[in-house]
Amino acid sequence: MAGDKPISRQRRWQIAQKAKGMCMYCSQPSEEGYNSGLCRKHRDMNTERQRERKVSRFLNSPDDGEDE
């Protein structure tokens, strides 16, 4: 079961940082109004990374756009 596994020190620290309203990566105050637990810098980096993943998935899709 998932509940039986111990939590690593890093993950425990990340959860504590989020609970305090701090960025989970750099201890800067997290953005107000966002539940991500990230500062503006890391939130923007995460957004760009997700955007790149979405584009690469679209470009690597097996569908060539032709309807049969």
Image: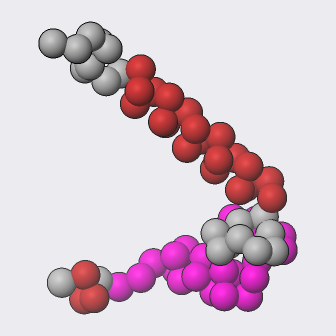
- Residue at 71% over, 71% down: 34
Which residue is farthest front? 68
* Residue at 58%, 82% in the rendered image: 15
Whole-percent x, y for residue 22 in the image: 76, 77
Residue 58, by quadrant, is top left
Identify whether 21 is placed above or below 28: below
Q: Is residue 8 left or right of residue 31?
A: left
Q: Is residue 50 above or below residue 31?
A: above
The reply to whether residue 29 is visible in this rendering is yes
The C terminus sits in image quarter: top left
Residue at 55% x, 33% y is 52
Q: In the shown orientation, is residue 59 left or right of residue 51?
A: left
Q: Is residue 49 magenta?
A: no
- Visible residue check, residue 13: no
**Bounds of the magenta span?**
6-30
Nearer-the-camera pick, 64 or 68: 68
31 relative to 49, above or below: below
Residue 49 pos. (x, y %): 59, 41
Count of numbered marks: 0
Residue depicted at 25% across the width and 20% down the height: 62
Image coordinates for residue 61, horizontal then vertical, percent: 31, 24
